[in-house]
Image (cartoon, rainbow, N blue to C red):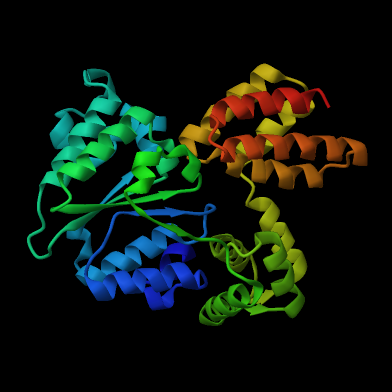
Amino acid sequence: MWTVKYRPETLDGIVGNKKAVDMLRLVVSSGRLPHLVIHGPAGCGKSTAVLALANEMYGEDYERNLTYFNASDFFDQGKRYLVRDKRFIRFLGTDDPKKIQSSVISIFKDLVNEYAAMGSLDADYKIIFIDSAESLREDAQHALRRIMERYSKTCRFVFSTTQPSRLISPLRSRGLELFFTYVGEDEFITFLKGVAEAENLDVSDDAWDNLYMLCKGNIACGLNILQTVSLESSGKVDTEMIFTASQESIPAGVRELYRAILKKDLPAARKAIDPLLIRDGMSGVEVISHLHKVIWEEALQPEDIAAMLRKLSDADLLIRSGASDRIQLEALVTEMANV
């Protein structure tokens, strides 16, 4: 994947978000890393920044001083996810989720406790990186607050989230907050032009403008579309190819959900939500973003499009404010089916 192939390994390679990156440089130069809460929209470079920070602090072997947990996988997929991660086998003693007696929250507390208690062999402390922290249950967050206090000499916690309002105040107050967002047009196009040159792609000027319009500064989105185009082109890329690839990037599950909404088949629509959230690991905001794209493809009456967009915007606001993704998506499909 080009999102991995062209991921910056150092802070200097990160595009945009100058204030946040400058703060991370100060942290590296001082050698005193505080707990961090990094928030911003999906695909804006939060995880890339944490990996680059660890690389600069610990060098090429930073993996032994960086422990990664994805809270969405942990709490949304539960025991099915735990048995798939080889790191957890020694804790669980089985690869059969039906044989696991402990609750997911108990396993989470035990795992974080054990990793936090183990000191680094070649550094003052190590990093425990919890991605998609908005999926952390409240009891898990309170447990983390106590763990952070207990093991402050052996580790630092870094939380990455698209919805900081879902984190409890005691957790947020213990970390330095950094905001990341999508990059500007010039930075977006300059970075992707370098990728296109490395991959021998000849992209027209208007195609670059339309790619930025589609991705709105999301470099991960731009890389995915360019890679899709590269698989089907002979090296020449135009606007039509960019638009075609962007439509193909919409998950089939979202289209299935939308077809159920149009048919007013609410049981099928509700059934389509779980695979998107659990199997595909999408957030409610991402599902809404894809639905927004699908709506514009349909030959609907302007007043119907406007009504659906109002429903999408209301659900988006509620989810970003900390409401349950699944509950709000169920409410959304019910309201959209009645348009």
Q: With 294 as the anchor, is 121 left or right in this view?
A: left
Work out which residue is located at the far left of the displayed protein and give it.
Answer: 121
Indicate whether 130 appears above or below 76. Answer: below
Residue shown at the point (57%, 63%) measured from the top left: 182
Residue 298, located in which quarter of the rendered image?
A: top right
Left or right for 51, reference 46: left
Report how many numbered discs are placed on residues in the image: 0
Depth order, front residue of 39/168: 168
Residue 72 horizontal/vertical position (percent): 41, 38
Q: As rendered, which of 225 and 192 lies closer to the eye?
A: 192
Position above or below: 207 against 4: below
* Left or right of 275 on screen, residue 117: left
Residue sitting at x 44%, y 40%:
134
Residue ID at (14%, 29%): 93
Give the x, y percent position of residue 299.
88, 42
Inspect this view and state whether residue 318 appears: yes
Q: Split into 4 quadrants, where in the image is the C terminus?
A: top right
Q: Which of the pair 67/273 is nearer the observer?
A: 67
Q: Position of residue 334 (x, y in %)?
A: 72, 22
Residue drawn at x 78%, y 28% is 262
Give 40 or 93, whichever is nearer the viewer. 40
Horizontally, is 105 left or right of 301 in the view?
A: left
Is residue 60 in sight in this rendering?
A: no
User: How far across and how far down the image is residue 174, in percent?
Assistant: 32, 48
